[in-house]
Image (cartoon, helix red, strand yellow):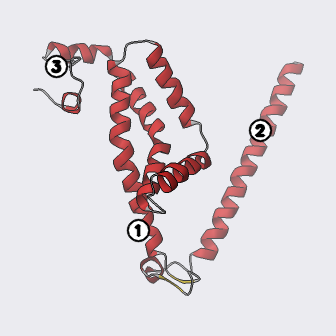
Amino acid sequence: MTNKRIHQAIAFGTFRIISLSVVAILFVILGFIVVRGFSVISWKFLTSMPEDGMTKGGIYPAIVGTLCLIAGSMIFAFPIGVLSGIYINEYLTDSWLKRFMRTMTNNLAGVPSIVFGLFGMTLFVNTLKFGDSIIAGSLTLGLMVLPVIIRTTEEALKSVDDTLRLGSYALGRQKCRQYAGLYCLLRIQI
C-alpha cells in the first residue's frame, strides 16, 4: 500500500469510530430518557393541567400550544413559500433579481434559530405589541421555515422535465405572464 492509502485508511477509520461513538452516546441518552420516563407517561399525565407551580400534574397545555404554534406557522409560511418558489422558478427570468433572491433565501436558511427568535421578539412582541402569544411565535417560526419551503418548492419545480411543460402548453395551458395572481397560479385547465 502506498503512503497515501495508509493515511486515507487511518482517516476513514478514525471518522468511523467517532461517528459510531456519537451514535452510541445518542442511543444511551435516548435509552436513559425512555427507561426513566416511560413509567411516568400515562393518559392522565398527557391530558391533565399542570398543578402546584408546574411541578406536578400534566402537560396538556404544552401539547395544545405546540400544535397551535405549528399550525399557525404553516398557515403563514406554506402559501407564501410555495407561491414565492413558483414565482422565482417559473416567472422570473435569469437576472440579477433571481440570483439575489436565491442568495437571500440561502442566507436566511443558514441563520441560527436564536437570531430568528430575537428578531421575532423585537418585531412581533415589542414593536407590534403582540405580547407573548401564539401569533407572535407562529409568525416567528413561519419566518424561520419560509426559506426552506421556498427552496424546496424551487427544487421540486426544477425536477419537472421541460417536455412535460411543453406538453401542457400544447394542451392549452397558459403561462399567465400578464397577471400572475393567485387564481392564475393555482387554476387547472382541462
Mark sitting earlier along the chain (2/1): 2
Residue 63, x across and y down, in percent: 44, 68
Label 3 residue SS: loop
User: Is 17 displayed left or right of 112 in the figure?
Assistant: right
Residue 40, x across and y down, in percent: 56, 80
Could you say which disc has been placed on residue 64 in the image?
1
* Image quarter (top left, top right, bottom left or bottom right) of the C terminus: top left
User: Is 32 displayed left or right of 173 in the figure?
Assistant: right
Q: Which residue is mark 2?
A: 15
Task: Between label 2 and label 1, give the one nearer the viewer.
Answer: 1
Figure check: 85 above or below 111: above
Residue at 82 percent of width and 32 percent of height: 11
Residue at 39 percent of width and 61 percent of height: 68
Residue at 52 percent of width and 28 percent of height: 104
User: Is 121 displayed left or right of 142 in the figure?
Assistant: right
Q: What is the spatial separation of the Cα atoms under label 3 and label 1, in whole angstroms?
A: 43 Å
Q: Is residue 1 visible?
A: no
Q: Quadrant of residue 67?
A: bottom left
Q: Of residues 120 and 112, which is closer to you in this image?
A: 120
Label 2 residue SS: helix
Amino acid carrying label 3: it is Arg
Label 1 residue SS: helix
Q: Which residue is mark 3?
A: 173
Q: Mark 3, residues whose alpha carbon is within 10 Å: few (<14), some, or many (≥20)?
A: some
User: Is 107 displayed left or right of 45 in the figure?
Assistant: right
Count up the numbered dots: 3
Amino acid carrying label 1: it is Val
Q: Of residues 166 and 97, which is closer to you in this image?
A: 97
Mark sitting earlier along the chain (3/1): 1
